[in-house]
Amino acid sequence: MVIIEVSLLSGFIMTSRSRMLLENRTIVKKIEVKANVVYIYLEKLNDESQTFTLQLEQVIQVKNLKPTSIKIYDYYQPEERALAEYSAVCS
């Protein structure tokens, strides 16, 4: 099992439409939202490229918005992981 851990930008939430679109993908086993982190559980990954799009909605205006992280790792071997940062399109 593979986990994609998306830390949300300050003042943002994931839209319900985004969650629905992710849940309809056959590769997605489960989605959890805890505080400001979205966990996307995948059955497995292979050599085929995958793209995941999360639509976020700003609910609180935050000044000096800082980038945040996306981690992907193997549930059974968490030391095998990748890390990337993202920021708001408008920043």
Image (cartoon, rainbow, N blue to C red):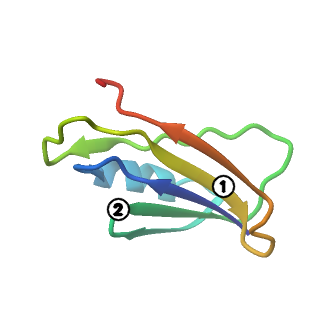
Mark 2 or mark 1, which has the lower sequence index?
2
Name, please, the residue furthest toward the front.
64
Mark 1 lies on a secondary structure that is strand
Q: Which residue is mark 2?
A: 36
Work out which residue is located at the far top of the displayed protein and give it.
90
Compared with 4, 48 (above or below) is above
Residue 72 bears which disc, if any? Answer: 1
Few, some or many residues within 10 Å of mark 2 (<14, 14–19, 20+): some
Quarter of the image with the C terminus in it: top left
Quadrant the N terminus occupies = bottom right
Q: Amino acid at mark 2?
A: Asn
- Secondary structure of the residue carrying numbered label 2: loop
Q: Nearer the viewer, residue 25 or 68?
A: 68
> What residue is at 40 percent from the left and 55 percent from the top?
20
**Quadrant hosting residue 33:** bottom left
Q: Position of residue 44 (x, y in %)?
A: 77, 61
Q: Residue 54 got which mark?
A: none
